[in-house]
Amino acid sequence: MEEDRVNEGDLDRIVRLLDGASLIVHGFDGIVQRWTAGCEYLYGWTRDEAIGKVVHDLLATEFPQELEEIRLEVRTRGFWTGEVSHLRKDGVRITVACRWTLLQLNAPQALIVQTNNDVSGMRRVQEELGEREAHLKSILATVPDAMVVIDERGMVTSFSAAAERLFSYRADEVVGRNVRMLMPSPEREAHDSYISNYLRTGQRRIIGHGRVVVGLKKDGSTFPMELSVGEATANRTRTFTGFIRDLTSRHRIEAELRQSQKMEAIGQLTGGLAHDFNNLLAAIGGNLEMLETRLSDTSQLTLLREAQSAADDGAKLTTQLLAFGRRQALAPQTIDVGALLAEFSELLQRTLGDSVELRTILPGRRTCALVDKAQLQSALLNLSINARDAMPDGGRLTIEISAVEIDSDYSQMYPLVQPNKYVLISVTDNGIGMSPDVRDHAFEPFFTTKAPGAGTGLGLSMVYGFAKQSAGHLQLYSEVGQGTTVRLFLPRAAESDRSVPTDRVDISVSPSGRETILVVEDDARVRRVTVARLTALGYDVIEATNGHEAWAELERQDGIRLLFTDVAMPGGMNGDELASRVRESRPDMKILLTSGYSEPHAASREIAAGAGWLKKPYTSHELAVRLRSLLDG
């Protein structure tokens, strides 16, 4: 329209008025007609150098779209805005926010008024912020600790990828909501007052300190976590950043280690008690045995045999204690555990009774473990009886055999299970289950929830000790009303591993002899019984109370054929050390070791070298047979 047109004089006045601004007037052909002082300052070219040049060539302009598209937009809309890149005279390229406005002169020619604002600094800041934001996002996506950012009102403004994994919420489910949704009661109700109290008084509870609290997951479950909170202020607005570390695995590891240390201490105590008790039983049983041959009165023999029966029960009890204390004598051999269970299941079903359904799940191939067969059967029987007693109204017992391999990741969660290949025996019932308190004490000896006289409380503790002594592990899972699962891990063995043969003796006779035997025993009562037994069998006996006395007797006496010594003795030389010295100086002498610990590995080197082994308490017949097997061998 005519009123929208201006003449050349008006244009010159406008340019002079805006000379300080960066303003260029050019035609659609790009030839510069006006060049202000602001352009000289911004680009470095003078007015004389610029006028008459094509502005796009002069400034080496880089457009965000095709130039013809921009010109068409100016013609149809009357303007165009966008960011372009210009090259200054000094060779520095800058980013410019540009606006082209159509100017219609009285003459037919139309011009473009181009205003330019250098936004390079702003662009650099935006790029740096973008890089920092990308870097921060990459950190938040990979850092193992969860991160939650909240404002002064407690509203979540940022929720990291690790936080998503930890709490099971997506970020869009949490951002914009109060952080108390991640807390269980009563912390949930009190959280807002913590923030308001801090903003009002400056009193800190967690900020800058860190503490262990409880988190709430999307599914309603809770977990222990370590929370550290930092504070930042920008534009008078405070934000709080919480760094969260899941302590579930750490607490599990600490609990397992505490349990292991406790069980180790109890095991040492019970093992020591069993050792001393076996010495007492050896004296009691030996004297009763010799007294039996001197009595003819039936009523007196009845009383004696009652005492012998009690002594036998005491020996069984010490065997159980030694099993828990991991000091029982094991005879490991390669056993196909699946085949053993198949053979053993009929006996188990009879033991369980008709009210309990026994279900066995066996692998389709051999699963061999290097283990003591009798002790494994005893462990399965103990676990089955415990399961039966936990199902007073009947139920289902499932025993599953499988081959598993524990890797380092699993071992980090359960440090008492070493990385290895195992045969896993899982015994599961659907009985009454255990409370957490009962579960924590289940492996301790003499702990039982059964009625008085209904159990010794040694069943699970024996299985625990057997597993540990077999280089395996025992795990217990139980909840009230949900039943119980006991998982027994036994090291897997190759099928080619050779079994360890067991000794078989003929109990119909008690062989005697005329050789000279050196008996070394620090317990006087046990020593007297042993000497009496050997004398009754026809042997000549020399006594010693400790290793040093025995060594002195060996140096004085040349006719000693066999050394019969206890392993655990005071005086600075135990039975193992004495046997070692004897084997080096007199390799032809036979050696028989004994101990109330029933722990062959205490003298494993000497046993491997040919020494015999006899566990206390033993009968006169067992002693006689073992002596002849050594002396005649």
Image (tube, grey):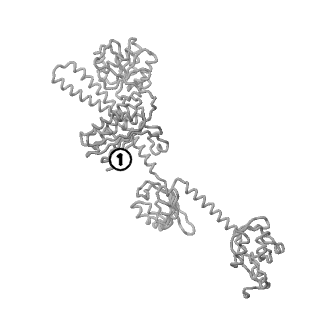
Observer-nearest of 545 and 71: 71
Above/below status of 151 relative to 139: below
> Residue 477, how many percent across, how many down?
37, 46
Q: Residue at x 37, y 29 (%)?
A: 329
Q: Determine whether, in the image, residue 70 is placed left or right of residue 593.
A: right
> Residue 542, how many percent across, how many down?
34, 16
Q: Residue at x 76, y 65 (%)?
A: 92
Q: Determine whether, in the image, residue 152 is placed left or right of residue 549.
A: right
Observer-nearest of 165 and 53: 53
> Residue 419, how many percent across, how many down?
48, 39
Mark 1 neighbour class, 10 Å CA radius: few under 14, some 14 to 19, many 20 or more:
many
Above/below status of 114 relative to 617: below
Image quadrant containing the C terminus: top left
> Residue 283, how many percent across, how many down?
28, 24
Observer-nearest of 66 and 154: 66
Residue on which disc 1 sits: 478
Q: Determine whether, in the image, residue 66 is placed left or right of residue 522.
A: right
Q: Quadrant of residue 334?
A: top left
Image quadrant containing the N terminus: bottom right
In the displayed orientation, state which residue is furthest to the bottom: 3
Tag count in the figure?
A: 1
Amino acid type, mark 1: Ser
Whether residue 321 is visible: no
Q: Determine whether, in the image, residue 132 is placed left or right of residue 579.
A: right
Q: Quadrant of residue 310?
A: top left
Secondary structure, mark 1, is strand
Above/below status of 29 relative to 433: below
Observer-nearest of 151 and 541: 151
